[in-house]
Image (cartoon, rainbow, N blue to C red):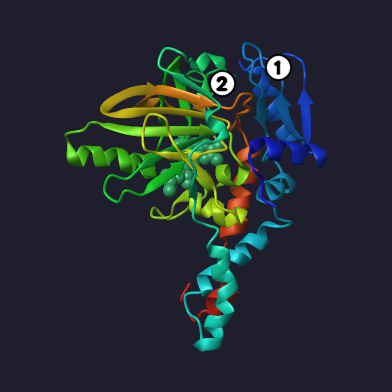
Amino acid sequence: MPHDDLQDFIRTLEKKKELKRIPFEVDPYLEITEFADRGAKQGGPALLFENPKGSQIPLLINAFASDRRMAIALGVERMDDIAVRITELKELKKPEGIMGAMKMLPKLGELSNIFPKTVSDGACKEVILREGQFSLDSFPILHCWPDDGGRYITLPLVFSRSRRTGKPNCGMYRMQVFDDKTCGMHWQTHKQGADHYRQLNAEGKDMRMPISVAIGADPAVTFSAIAPLPPDIDEMMFAGFLRNEPVRMVKSETNDLLVPADAEIVLEGYVELGELRREGPFGDHTGFYSLDDDYPVFHITCVTHRKKPVYAATIVGPPPMEDFWMGKAVERIFHIDEAAIARSGGYL
Ligand SMILES: Cc1cc2nc3c(=O)[nH]c(=O)nc-3n(C[C@H](O)[C@H](O)[C@H](O)COP(=O)(O)O)c2cc1C
Ligand SMILES: [Mn+2]
């Protein structure tokens, strides 16, 4: 069964004794990440900090930090089940005769679920805050490691659109908080957000690119943002495939980008061509600090969220951490099935 949203996932984790609530005050400055680091390394449960210091909003971390929780997140017993479904899909390319085509039908039925469904409203808009009404300071944004350049939004789903093709993209790119309404946008040059940004350059007149960022969503949606998909595959289609149910998308308040209607929090705004700012250092996946460097600036112009949102976060650092389990799931799901290649006559 797919999860409706992040809070549905939290309920499932709790039922399966995979979540611990922390009712006392813990500081998003280094303390929460200390708990999370130890928890990840000891095979501990997901942690829901109900009372992060300085914020009214609870924070979820380590929700993906084990094989079992990754499987729960994606609603399967084993990751290989998804790999098999992907392999079967790829084999569809070559039906053998009319019987082969008939056998395809159930698979094609499954495909009808992959297209995102646009809806007119969603829980992510229960509260709408325009310019002057919001501040990033209201969220429990983590300062992860002592020598980090500042606080970072560590699990953001960054939505943008290609000017060339009109196709949307969603990638996870960390965002350093510069002040109460601006962040860094750390898309590496080979990522699609960066490619969309360079397309501004090609046009040269309108210098702004709209961006919407969802924080906290159904785990299949979050996982899709980190999945290594080809550039022309919409992550939300992949999420629909994983969920076997379409992702419900709603238009942002202040731009045309679609965001998951059931997200916890959405930041809307823009990046502007040529405006770069120093980002970093950041205690990274490798276990070392990544050096500071120049990245685009994300200006936030509107914030929407649920009445009672949960802020989703992670911490990366000396492995194994939560991202190790996410990476392992990617590996299991996208591994190359030699037998299937042989069966397909080299089509895969
Ligand atoms: C926790 C976490 C943090 C990540 N942070 C970044 C980041 O800051 N910059 C980046 O370019 N990729 C980052 N990634 C990897 C991208 O999300 C991943 O490569 C994704 O597939 C990119 O999507 P795209 O191909 O649509 O650009 C991160 C992944 C995870 C799991
Ligand atoms: Mn992509």
Q: Residues within 10 Å of mark 2 (few under 14, many from 20)?
A: many
Mark with earlier residue (2, 1): 1
Q: Residues within 10 Å of mark 1 (few under 14, many from 20)?
A: many
Q: Is residue 181 left or right of residue 337?
A: left
Hey, what amino acid is under mark 1? Answer: Asn
Mark 2–mark 1 distance (CA, rounded to whole Å):
13 Å
- Report the number of discs: 2
Could you tell me which residue is drawn at 28 percent across and 24 percent down?
275
Q: What residue sits 62% from the left and 14% below the top?
A: 55
> Is 275 placed left or right of 128 in the picture?
left
Q: Is residue 345 visible?
A: yes
Q: Amino acid at mark 2?
A: Ile
Q: Is residue 339 above or below residue 173?
A: below
Q: Position of residue 180 (x, y in %)?
A: 45, 14
- Counting from the top left corner in percent of width and height, residue 147 is at 53, 18
Q: Residue at x 30, y 38 (%)?
A: 197
Residue mark closest to the camera, 2 vs 1 = 1
| Mark 1: secondary structure | loop
| Secondary structure beneath label 2 | loop
Q: Position of residue 137 (x, y in %)?
A: 52, 14
Outermost front residue: 120
120 left or right of 188? right
As drawn, the label of residue 141 is: 2
Q: Which residue is drawn at the image coordinates 51% and 87% (left, top)?
A: 98
Of residues 347 and 336, which is closer to you in this image? 347
Tag 1 residue: 51
Whether 20 is drawn above or below 31: the answer is below
Residue 290 visible in the shown view: no
